Amino acid sequence: MRVLISKEEIPYTDWHLPSIYLVLQMSYSHKNLIGFGQACGVPDRRFARCRNSSLNSVEKYIIAVFVAIAWYNAAELVVFCLSTFKFYRGWYFWSLLIASLSLFPICLGYIFYIFYPGITYYLSISLIIVSWSCMVTGHSLILWSRLHLIIRSPRVLHLTLAMIIIDAIILHASTAVLLYGSHSNNAVMASRCARGYNIMERVQLVIFCVQELLISGIYLWETAKMLRLHPGPLHYKILSQFLVINIFIIILDVAVVGIQFAGYYALQVTFKPVAYSLKFKLEYAILGRLIALATSPSNSEPFPSSSSHPIPCRISRQPSLELTHTVYIVPSI
């Protein structure tokens, strides 16, 4: 076997990998050692002190800005959530509150993981895994919990919830196992898990993006049906605003995926909480417009639905949507 180190190939057979690292650390830069460790299968945490050195000053400043924006938006979101809802209950309230709170630990975990201030990697990984699951799946549950405002098909609602649960179990569990395994003391296992994590991270990012786009597509389709059945200036205005908001959300999803596939891991993982914090802020504007659309005087008939037997329901009876006031203005972002 031959390993490429700083554009020079050197053979090795029975050398102990950590010993090679100790010998070569006197001659090669930190960046070359990181590439050597990945090629040899040495766990990435053996090169923990090199991780911070691989980032230039511009990237460090960008990461700091992303973390600051995410934390500011998270604090504002928690205040909005506690002051907007009249009753603290229901899927919508708890999904929005937990997803907003998860922005704090996920940024902290990525700071520990990227800059490595001496804290064990297992603590930073645990913070990332738990908060990442709450943030991503929490946003999907937010979308699902207000889906009943415009659709009355139990089949569609149940299938959407089943999709969210299945994706969460499969993707979160597999990614967590691979991420923990990539920091194993076993060099062979760490190398295999690291390669699997690099692939799985891109796969889960794309699947969650498609999942959110699918749910948003259901909203657009059903609101368009409502507009055809109940035309009017209010409906046209609300639908146009709803379309603009969803287009902005799609742009955020595409930006996260694009940064990931461009190879900027540190920027992608810190930009992701910013993107989700903006999505959570837009939730207040979307909910206000959906309630205005559903409770407008022209909607005296049941909502259009793909089900032949719509379920009668009044908005005021939904505990998850009991607000102190209807929100129409997008909070400052």
Image (cartoon, rainbow, N blue to C red):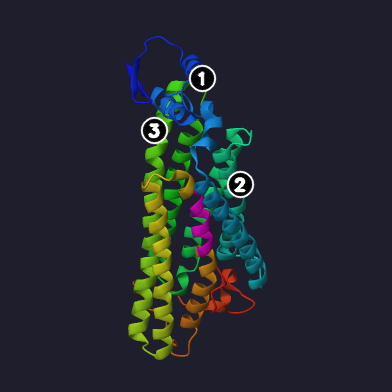
Task: From the image, state whether disc 1 or disc 3 is nearer to you.
Answer: 1
Going from the N terminus, do you reach mark 2 or mark 3 first? Answer: 2
Nearest to the observer: residue 253 or residue 209: 253
99 lies above or below 174: below
The answer to whether residue 122 is visible is yes
Give the total of numbered labels: 3
Quick one: which residue is furthest to the top in this view?
14
Q: Secondary structure at mark 1?
A: loop
Residue 300 lies, in percent from the top left, at 45, 88
Going from the N terminus, do you reach mark 2 or mark 1 first? Answer: 1
CA gap, disc 2 to disc 3? 25 Å
Q: In which quadrant is the C terminus drawn?
A: bottom right
Three-letter code for the amino acid on which mark 2 is drawn: Leu
Q: Secondary structure at mark 3?
A: helix
Residue drawn at point x = 61 percent, y = 46 percent:
108
Three-letter code for the amino acid on which mark 3 is drawn: Arg
Magenta segment, prevailing SS (helix, strand or loop): helix
Report the span colored magenta.
Answer: 269-278
Three-letter code for the amino acid on which mark 1 is drawn: Met
CA gap, disc 1 to disc 3? 28 Å
Task: From the image, state whether disc 2 or disc 1 is nearer to you.
Answer: 1
Residue that badge 3 annotates: 195
Residue that badge 1 annotates: 26
